[in-house]
Image (tube, rainbow, N blue to C red):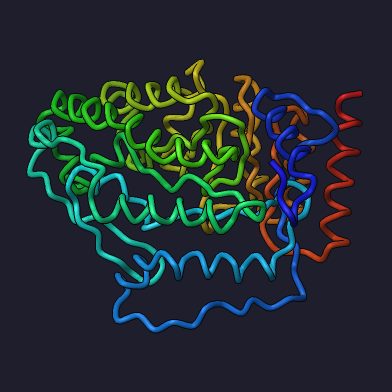
């Protein structure tokens, strides 16, 4: 696949494929924001409500087109568009409605128990899922040769149960009827391939590689496995109820990386790293919990388990500090902040020297 503003995309894909395998071709992948001197002139359109704005397919693509004109794509940063109606789109497949805010949306829980969820059949023919389909189709049409159309944010397994029940009610279910939680989690997971394939088949048919809100690349099926809800439960409850669904998702995919969100979720790190199906880990320490160098033991444990790492750091200096404690194979640098082109080039050059020195 070739992109007009990213002629080195094949090399980017090659570096990511090596990263998934905890290998290196020439250097680790680097996703870094480079400041642009071009200003975006976004579309001007009045909407009568936040819902209308979120659901406006043409407006969404116009915003992408405007953003591409003012962006710089350097190293492993590439042009992409993620169609979105917020993180709980999968709940609509099981009958939930969405409420929209300025920058996100949330589902309205509909199930009175996990046992009720067992009676709900998935339905992709709803207004929200069809909106995502339309955004993907229009993006593939208008973005051909210009950007990659990404898979949307899909919160599944335990997070999907929490959307259908409400997180607090799901906690009570775990205490009162834990078997129903496991059964409900298995039930919604049976629809995972249905949901994933419905969207991925459109993107893959256009000859595009796979990416999503986490900007990796892979030539086939890949995704970010996640469950933010697990920060609220014990390791025993996790293993008994939600982990089997996550492992099923990992087996379905060719490549996967788990999104571990916040210190409360660290109690499950060892359990996750034990899973042979897991390829990598994205550790998000959260606002006020950084910098990344405070969590070196986490990164080293991930590497010791043979998994790749998406290293989200406060800035390039933080990323360098962590790197001194790691081996280069399987590290993907994602420093926060924005940089001049010279600063970004300096960091990429450093990453190549660092990798060469560590491998020698």
Left or right: 267 as drawn, with respect to 19: left
- Which residue is more in the foreground, 1 or 307? 1
Q: Position of residue 167 (x, y in %)?
A: 23, 47
Write the residue at 24% across / 32% down: 188
Q: Position of residue 329 (x, y in %)?
A: 75, 27
Q: Please, is residue 42 above or below residue 169 in the view?
A: below
Farthest residue toward the front?
141
Mark yes or no: residue 167 visible: no
- Which residue is more in the foreground, 316 or 136? 136
Q: Please, is residue 107 above or below residue 236 in the view?
A: below
- Which residue is more in the foreground, 345 or 325? 345
Q: Quadrant of residue 331?
A: top right
The mark total stands at 0
Left or right: 271 as drawn, with respect to 337: left
Write the residue at 69% across / 70% down: 70
Q: Quadrant of residue 56?
A: bottom left
Q: Quadrant of the N terminus?
A: top right
Write the residue at 73% across / 51% down: 318
Mark yes or no: residue 121 visible: yes
Q: Quadrant of the C terminus?
A: top right
Q: Please, is residue 266 above or below residue 42 in the view?
A: above
Write the residue at 63% across / 47% down: 312
- Which residue is more in the foreground, 250 or 196? 196
Q: Position of residue 327 (x, y in %)?
A: 77, 28
Left or right: 74 as drawn, with respect to 128: right
Q: Position of residue 99 (x, y in %)?
A: 25, 64
């Amino acid at each position: 696949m070739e992109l007009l503003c990213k002629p080195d995309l094949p090399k980017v894909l090659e570096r990511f494929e090596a990263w998934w395998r905890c290998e290196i071709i020439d250097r680790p992948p680097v996703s870094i924001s480079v400041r642009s001197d071009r200003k975006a002139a976004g579309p001007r359109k009045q909407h009568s409500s936040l819902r209308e704005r979120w659901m406006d397919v043409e407006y969404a693509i116009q915003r992408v087109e405007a953003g591409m004109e003012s962006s710089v794509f350097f190293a492993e940063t590439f042009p992409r568009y993620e169609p979105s109606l917020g993180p709980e789109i999968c709940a609509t497949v099981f009958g939930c409605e969405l409420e929209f805010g300025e920058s996100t949306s949330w589902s309205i829980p509909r199930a009175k128990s996990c046992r009720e969820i067992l009676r709900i059949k998935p339905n992709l023919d709803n207004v929200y899922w069809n909106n995502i389909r339309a955004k993907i189709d229009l993006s593939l049409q208008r973005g051909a040769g210009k950007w990659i159309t990404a898979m949307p944010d899909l919160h599944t397994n335990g997070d999907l149960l929490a959307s259908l029940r409400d997180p607090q009610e799901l906690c009570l279910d775990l205490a009162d009827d834990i078997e129903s939680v496991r059964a409900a989690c298995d039930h919604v997971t049976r629809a995972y391939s249905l949901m994933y394939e419905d969207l991925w088949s459109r993107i893959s048919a256009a000859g595009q590689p796979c990416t999503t809100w986490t900007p990796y690349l892979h030539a086939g099926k890949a995704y970010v496995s996640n469950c933010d809800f697990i920060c609220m439960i014990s390791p025993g409850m996790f293993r008994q109820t939600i982990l089997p669904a996550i492992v099923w998702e990992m087996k379905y995919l060719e490549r996967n990386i788990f999104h571990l969100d916040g210190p409360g979720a660290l109690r499950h790190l060892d359990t996750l790293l034990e899973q042979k199906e897991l390829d990598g880990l994205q550790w998000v320490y959260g606002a006020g919990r950084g910098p990344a160098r405070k969590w070196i033991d986490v990164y080293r444990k991930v590497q010791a388990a043979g998994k790749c790492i998406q290293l989200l750091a406060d800035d390039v200096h933080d990323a360098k500090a962590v790197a001194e404690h790691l081996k280069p194979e399987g590290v993907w640098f994602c420093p926060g902040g924005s940089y001049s082109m010279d600063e970004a080039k300096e960091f990429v050059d450093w990453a190549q020297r660092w990798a060469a020195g560590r491998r020698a």
